[in-house]
Amino acid sequence: MARADSDAVTTPPLLQDDPHEPHAVEPSRSRPGPVAAVALVAGVVGYLGAWHVSLWSDEVATISAARRTPGELMALLGHVDAVHGLYYAGMHAWVAAFGAGPASIRLASALAVAVGAAGVVVLGTRVANARVGVVAGLAFALLPRVTWAAVEARSWAATLALAVWATVALHRAVSSRRTSAWVLYGLLGALAVATNIYLVMLWLAHGITVLVIARDRLRPWVATACVAALAAGGVVLAATRQAGQLGSTDLTPVRLVRMVVVNQWFLGETPTPTSGAGAVDTELWKISSVALAALAWCVIGFAVVRARGARPALLAWTLPWLLVPSVLLVAAALVRPSLYNPRYLTFCAPAVALLLAAGLCELRRRAMVAVSVALVLLAAPVYVSQRAVLAKSSADLSLVAAELRSRTSQGDAVYYGPRDPAVDGLVRRSLRTVALGYPASVRGLRDIALVADPATSETLFGTSRPLGPALERLPDHGTLWVVRREDQPDAAADDRTLRDAGLRVVGTWRGPQTEIVELRR
């Protein structure tokens, strides 16, 4: 018999679970021990090897922004990356306390994943039972999208934690009549959207959930959503004005399907630019990611079929979370491909983990063990690929840094080649990323192209002169190190400019993306 106090659940009979189970009366409570254990596993699994992977340009942007004073950061956000402003502010405090090396800045993401895993256990216990909660937390910890986010110094891991705990808060709010529960939900929801505006879609999913399971709570949900929208509105408006920063993915229909079915949850972003459709799937991680996706979708499908009769409330909490953002983003991508990237839906990973856990827990014990082992074995090659040095789309900045550290001398000159053409005589994106990400490797070198450093220029990477004007600052004697993209379109023209300036090549190093040319007069 349901309790009549303020904590009674008003779930319609259609969505009640088995009345013989405790959670049919009120949400099950998670015990601190299992929650902490799963969080620890998720944090450790996520952090292992984080220091080994080379930084890439997006992570260098985080480092560049986080090292600024609050005033300098506000000036930057007025021009670019307002969508990441709250994350940058948090990382500013983190970097001030723990430094900006790869191991440090990625630790913040691993800790966020641990917090998210704890939330998954709590939520799974509340919407199903303790067994589903623990299994869901472990599935979350091993999901490739999550293990990728744990070693990515961007806001994706934070969105995982905020999304799941906002959902826990909403579950608490619809299960009680306490205003404090709605206030907490509103705060977490507004913080989530301010961290990444794509979490607006989580609010839409939550609205559908409330409509299905607790229609009498729809009015406070709408009121909370409106207040949260006002709180996060400034970030949303600023991000809208900078919409060009959201993405630039060029999608074909086949590649879009592969990204949604495989990459979105069961691959991450690793490890090369050829991981999409059209690549020759010879590497083990490519084959295993497809097999992992196939098996996982079978388990999820089984969970949906079984939960319709046994645990419909679980479906009400997970399916909108999984489907609404995915459908909206894919539909938007059909009109404007730049709006879609698999990483944008990272915050939906808890729903995938909960459905996987529900399906596994519906199996007989031996079948559950066999399928779980198969899922882990298939995820392992993907996990290992995410911890390779070149895991970030073949970014090789750490290799470039090591080469410069070992070969250069104090007082040598360095020129960082452009990543984009010059505009009004200035280059705004260059391979200065190696100096920003690994400053110790270039200490003592003279940057002959630098016009203004990142903070002064209110840009992420500083502004540079093109090669010709930069060479005017080169002394008559000494060594020049040219760091440039191996596929730089105007490399031949730059080579002529260097020869005309009396410089001769004495050595060349080539990495997967970058080359270093040593020249002397």
Image (tube, rainbow, N blue to C red):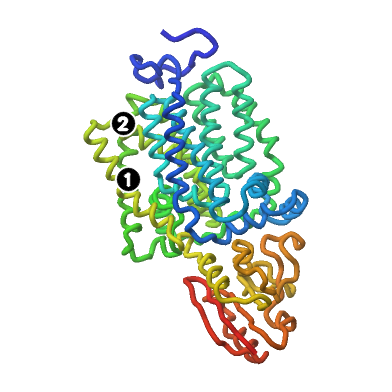
The structure residue drawn at horizontal position 34% and vertical position 48%, both measured from the top left corner, is: 293
Q: Quadrant of the N terminus?
A: top left
Question: Which residue is more in the foreground, 298 or 142?
Answer: 142
Give residue 307's mark: none
Q: How many C-alpha atoms fall within 10 Å of the one at disc 1: few (<14), some, or many (≥20)?
A: some
For the residue marked with disc 2, what is the amino acid? Cys
Q: Earlier in the sequence, mark 1 or mark 2?
A: 2
The structure residue drawn at horizontal position 60% and vertical position 34%, both measured from the top left corner, is: 189
Question: Which residue is more in the foreground, 113 or 414?
Answer: 414
The residues bearing labels 1 and 2 have C-alpha atoms spaced at a distance of 16 Å
Q: Which quadrant holds residue 15?
A: top left
Q: Which residue is mark 2?
A: 361
Q: How many C-alpha atoms fall within 10 Å of the one at disc 2: few (<14), some, or many (≥20)?
A: some
Q: Is residue 194 left or right of residue 112?
A: right
Give residue 376's mark: 1
Residue 289 sits above or below residue 224 on the image: below
Question: Which residue is more in the foreground, 408 or 9?
Answer: 408
Q: How many marks?
A: 2
Q: Quadrant of the C terminus?
A: bottom right
How far across and down, in percent of the image, does residue 514 sit? 53, 73
